[in-house]
Image: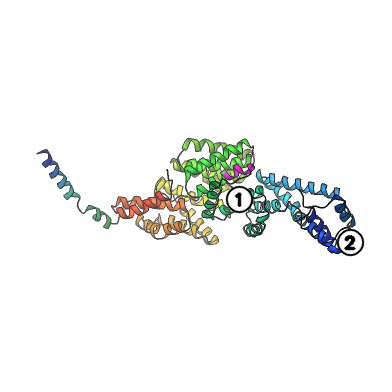
Amino acid sequence: MMNIGSILKYYRMRNNLTQAELCKGVCSISHLSKIESNKYIPHNETINELFKRMGIEWEREVDIYEGWKEKLETFIMHSVYYDLKAMEEGYKELSAHEDYLQSTDLVNRYELYKLRYFLFKQDTPRATQQVSILKRMETSFTEYEKGVSKVIYLIYDIFLQNFTEAENRLERIEEFRERIPHMFEGELFYQRAYLLHNRAQYSKSTYYAEMAVDHFRKDSNYIRLLHAQLLLAINYTNRDFILQADGLFKTILRNARMMQMEQLYQGALYNYSMLQNRRELHSSAYDMLKELKALLEPGADLYQAVLIHLLQTAVEENKEIDSLLDELEVLAGRKKDPYLKVQLDYFRKTKISQQELLNYCEQIAFPFLKKHDYIGEARSIAWRLANYYRSIGDYEKAGVYSLYHYDKGEKEL
Amino acid sequence: MKRKITIILLTAMFAAFAGMGTGFALEPNDSMETNAKGKDNLTPPSVLPPQT
């Protein structure tokens, strides 16, 4: 039910009336004050009279409220089905009437999905600000709103790479069998798969990605379905489920192209080339990456990943890497990203000697990647160092690196 | 008799390999190539579908 009192107060403030001025001859000030704080539901006559004084028809107000309620619900649906463009338009309209929404009981849902919207836009400062606003409102959340908030906070934590906090959140949801609104089930599976992938837990991530795919498919949530399929294909790749991964990549590439989802197409192509490298089809991987590089702007995040992956593929194929190294050097200088510097130095060392490369891996690359939670990269370096130390008979060091590799990898229980 | 031979053989093998481990460790192994195949390579950055 809408909060009549809050709406009354909203219009009184807009008309610059004091409580005494508005209620004179209708009811007492303390009575009005109780109505305005939604502690008391007044008779229709009282309400009609109070609104009439401000030149407002109550019935019309109800219609307006229902109209906004519907707009908010549409906005929420757009967020569930990942319709970014419609969300942008919806947000523009809703935020222009924020004062009104904040005077009704729609406020909690509006503020919650505002956070969801900022996360879509990857707007970290506004999302963080919105979280602190929501924290203050939490006591007034209904059960349903609490359920919504749990999923959106989870998305927020994963977005900020607060993985440990996100894991704790998921544990609480599981342990207390907390209720999550039905329409969020697919999203919850997806986020879980995403988090587990970041933790290099590929088999568990596969399980949840499959659940997300099933859910999105049943719900005809086609955009999110493609996202979940790509995540699943990447997990298959990491586990060397070559046939499954290959089939799925082809499906995603076909559908992304038909649906004109450029970024998704490029992401799928990048990961497909990863699969080709793993099955030692390096020249196929090399061609795909060349095609992809030509599609991208040099400033794009994907561009630098493609460049690094091209370097790796070229090294596998014993191809010349000088021009790629030059390009990465310019990029690393411009972006001042220490991760790029590590990649650059790593590939430079491949041109010098194995001993220098291994020293670099041990003294700089491995500690850096480990410290900053680049688990996949750190594991591959640990694997290489372990192999090296085993080959020269230094089993103690080999043990240390093997332990890291296995400890950060799958744990089959 | 059989047992004796086994012990002798084992002793001989042990003697042949004694000290080899550290010997290998001290010698820098630069004969291997720098390029690595498959799993030995540095994993390229992961590119995932949109999370948010």
Q: Number of callouts in the render?
A: 2
Q: In the image, what residue type sits under mark 1?
A: Lys
| Residue at 41 percent of width and 50 percent of height | A407
Residue A229 has which mark?
Answer: none
Please rate how many residues cluster around mark 2, counting C-alpha atoms within 10 Å: few if below 14, some from 14 to 19, many from 20: few
Q: Is residue A317 visible?
A: no
Residue A150 has which mark?
Answer: 1
Q: Is residue B23 visible?
A: yes
Q: Which residue is mark 2?
A: A24
Q: Is residue A195 left or right of residue A141?
A: left
Q: In the image, what residue type sits under mark 2?
A: Lys
Query: Which portion, as a residue range, is magenta?
Result: A179-188
Q: Which structural element holds mark 1?
A: helix
Residue A17 is situated, as x and y percent measured from the top left of the image, at 85, 63
Real-space CA distance between mark 1 and mark 2, rounded to the nearest whole angstrom = 45 Å
Specify whether residue A40 is painted magenta: no
Which of the colour schemes (rainbow, by chain, secondary structure, one colour) is used? rainbow
Q: In the picture shown, does residue A352 fall above or below A248?
A: below
Q: Nearer the viewer, residue A271 or A412?
A: A412
| Residue at 46 percent of width and 47 percent of height | A313
| Residue at 24 percent of width and 56 percent of height | B22
For residue A33, what is the image quadrant? bottom right
Q: Is residue A239 left or right of residue A75?
A: left
Looking at the figure, which quarter contains the C terminus of chain A?
top left
Main secondary structure of the magenta stretch: helix
Q: Nearer the viewer, residue A277 or B15?
A: B15
Please give the chain letter of the residue carrying mark 2: A
Residue A197 is situated, as x and y percent measured from the top left of the image, at 50, 47
Residue A391 is situated, as x and y percent measured from the top left of the image, at 30, 50
Residue A104 is situated, as x and y percent measured from the top left of the image, at 76, 53
